[in-house]
Image (cartoon, rainbow, N blue to C red):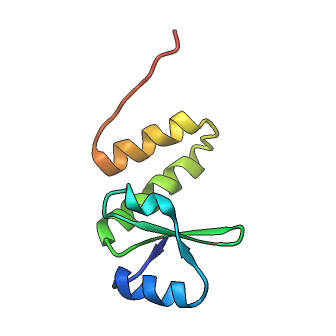
Amino acid sequence: MVYVRDLPIFAAYAESLGWEPDAANEYEDDEFNSFRKGEFNIIVTDKCSFFSSMVLSTQVCKKLNLLNKADRIMVFDAIQKGVLTIESNL
């Protein structure tokens, strides 16, 4: 995750360096964009609150050593959207 001041300016610069906008950008909300260059992928935002919540979500998942994808998604949703969904496999 990369925070930039102006996403359109960054996008133009990244594309001039060979980074290609990810096709998923067309379907996502306006919180972030992603770019690919070969095997590399970067996620970029110019929304400070979104960036902060992503960093916090990542830190919580790392601290708790969450290896299960559903658990990580639950943490991200709880922190970013204020939504807690607990799925039971019982």
Q: Using the image, determine if residue 58 lies above or below residue 5.
A: above
The quadrant in which residue 38 appears is: bottom right
Tell whether 18 sits left or right of 85: right
Along the viewing direction, whichever of 65 and 2 lies nearer the viewer = 2
Provide residue 45's location: percent of width, then percent of height.
39, 72
- Residue at 30% across / 66% down in the picture? 49
Provide residue 74's location: percent of width, then percent of height.
44, 37
- Residue at 59% across / 89% down in the picture? 17
- Residue at 36% across / 82% down in the picture? 8
Provide residue 21's location: percent of width, then percent of height.
50, 71
Q: Using the image, determine if residue 10 lies above or below residue 36.
A: below
Along the viewing direction, whichever of 64 and 81 lies nearer the viewer = 81
Q: Using the image, determine if residue 56 lies above or below residue 2.
A: above
- Residue at 45% across / 53% down in the picture? 57
Along the viewing direction, whichever of 44 and 77 lies nearer the viewer = 44
Q: Residue furthest top?
A: 90
Provide residue 52's location: percent of width, then percent of height.
38, 65
Along the viewing direction, whichever of 72 and 41 lies nearer the viewer = 41
Q: Tell me how many marks there are.
A: 0
